[in-house]
Image: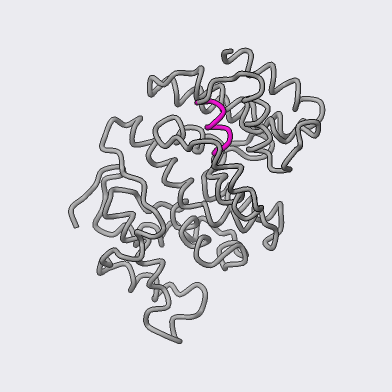
Amino acid sequence: MDVAAARALAEEHLAEALPRRWQHSQAVAATAADYAARLGLDPDVVVVAAWLHDVGYAPPLADTGFHPLDGAALLARSGWPDEVVNLVAHHSCADVEAERRGLGDVMRRYPDMPGAERDVLWASDATTGPDGQRLSVAERVLEVVQRYEPADLVSECMVHIAPQLAMAMQRTSQRIAGGPVSPAVSYDEWANVQLLPHILPVLEAWNPEGIAEYAEDEYEPEAQAFSSLLRVGYTIDVSMVVAVWEHWFGPQSCLTREHDLRKLEKLAEALQGPVRVAGAAQPM
């Protein structure tokens, strides 16, 4: 079972029944193939998973109603390699939505596979729109929220996982650049990091949610997140600003309402502060 077989299976289930999903899948696969070639990854794992990551949307395959699990179940039944099955099951941090749908036990049947292949799949999916258009992670997060409406479960999960998607994109870029690769940073780790001195004043001065006047530490969780990411070598770009902000304030935050990414460029630059080398951990 190889890339050609994966493409044929995805086309069989998506091209006619779900043409937009087919357009998206083709673009995700093309991006993953480019990244895999540049990183020397096995296309029969990561590119195959990219072709098949959304096959579970096909109506005849609906079992749980959650496409990563329904797709993974099809692939497991059909004898596809475990690496492909597990990548499809967990694509784009799917475990978060699985838990909220009451499907956590089903998801735990499939081992997660952190590493370059998973990052490539997540990055490719997180930078591809519903019609196959290339987007930044920030644009993709806001596009999903607007398409599903803020109160929808998909929107709520998307803003929760957005920092993980942004980190996967940056780690992929770091690997391509041949520099140090930043470690994954969990949300729990954010709470214990020592704040960088320039972060909180920037957020309080910006004060987009209009809450800084109520308490001096209203933006401390966001400041801790940005500090944690900077300390291990991530770059605070617009996508990371949107990802962290939406994670904490949810899909009805000011960023979702305004959708003004150009306005965020100056904020990202200010938050980046003295750290100027993208993809390399800097002493703080």
- Residue at the extreme left of the image, as rendered: 283
Camera-nearest residue between 132 and 115: 115
In the rendered image, residue 246, in percent from the top left (x then y), is placed at: 53, 61
In the rendered structure, does residue 236 fall within the stretch colored magenta? no
Residue 185 vertical position relative to residue 34 in the rendered view, above or below: below
Image quadrant where residue 17 sits: top right
Residue 233 vertical position relative to residue 256 in the rendered view, above or below: above
- Looking at the image, residue 192 sits to the left or right of residue 141; the answer is left
Image quadrant where residue 268 sits: bottom left
In the rendered structure, does residue 87 fall within the stretch colored magenta? yes
Q: How is the image coloured?
A: one colour
Residue 231 vertical position relative to residue 43 in the rendered view, above or below: below
Camera-nearest residue between 192 and 141: 192
Image quadrant holding the N terminus, namely: top right
Camera-nearest residue between 35 and 104: 104
- Looking at the image, residue 5 sits to the left or right of residue 170; the answer is right
In the rendered image, residue 93, in percent from the top left (x then y), is placed at: 53, 45
Q: Which residues are magenta?
A: 83-90
In the rendered image, residue 238, in percent from the top left (x then y), is placed at: 45, 53
In the rendered image, residue 172, in percent from the top left (x then y), is placed at: 40, 35
Query: At x 35% / y 70%, what residue is drawn?
Result: 202
Image quadrant holding the C terminus, namely: bottom left
User: Of helix, strand and loop, which mostly describes the magenta segment?
Assistant: helix
